[in-house]
Image (cartoon, rainbow, N blue to C red):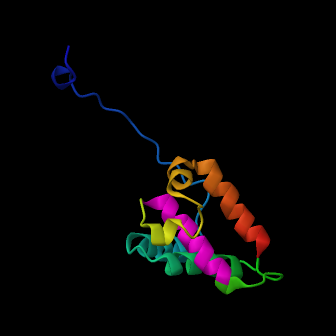
């Protein structure tokens, strides 16, 4: 029997509370970073990551945050969309390396940047 011919069945769905709620800082980060990503604004994207870490008190020993802002933004933007060489070349040596990188490689590079700064 096709799905469209099957009679509708009443089901009771229990509403479950979310396991975790996002705090205001994380909500702000999500909004700002998404807007920056869709605007292809690498600097704004990197700035949102650095701001989140700063607001969470994770930059106590950080150094050279201006460089981190730009490097992080370029890396994340290159991972979100196909980007021009101007962006991906800040992180990858060549186009083949950029195109063949998997999520785990982006994650390793991101952790490397955070550790470096």
Q: Is residue 2 above or below residue 103?
A: above
Identify the residue at horizontal 57%, vertical 70% (top origin).
Answer: 90
Q: Is residue 113 above or below residue 96?
A: below
Query: Would you say 13 lies left or right of 109 here?
Result: left
Residue 2 falls left or right of residue 45: left
In-image side of 115 versus 76 (left or right):
right
Q: Residue at x 58, y 81 (%)?
A: 47
Residue 73 in magenta?
yes
Q: Most extreme residue toward the top, as rendered?
A: 1
Q: How many marks?
A: 0
Residue 58 is covered by the magenta coloring: no
Q: In this orientation, which residue lies closer to the viewer: 90 or 53? A: 90
Foreground: 91 or 49? 91
| Front one among 77 and 13 | 77
Identify the image quadrant of residue 20.
bottom right
- Can you see residue 23? no
* Residue at the outermost front position: 94
Name the quarter where the C terminus is drawn: bottom right
Furthest residue to the right? 61
**Image location (x, y in percent) of residue 80:** 47, 60
Residue 29, position as x, y percentages in the image: 55, 74
Instruction: Tell me which corner region of the image, top left, top right, bottom left or bottom right, holds residue 83.
Output: bottom left
Q: What's the magenta region?
A: 67-81
Q: Residue 30 appears at what percent x and percent y?
A: 51, 70
């Amino acid at each position: 029997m096709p799905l469209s011919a099957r009679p509708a069945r009443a089901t009771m769905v229990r509403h479950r509370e979310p396991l975790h709620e996002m705090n205001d800082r994380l909500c702000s980060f999500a909004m700002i970073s998404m807007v920056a990503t869709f605007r292809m604004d690498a600097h704004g994207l990197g700035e949102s990551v650095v701001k989140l870490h700063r607001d969470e008190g994770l930059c106590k020993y950080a150094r050279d945050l201006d460089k981190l802002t730009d490097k992080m933004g370029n890396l994340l933007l290159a991972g979100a969309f196909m980007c021009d060489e101007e962006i991906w070349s800040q992180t990858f040596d060549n186009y083949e390396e950029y195109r063949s990188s998997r999520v785990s490689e982006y994650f390793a590079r991101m952790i490397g940047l955070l550790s470096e700064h």
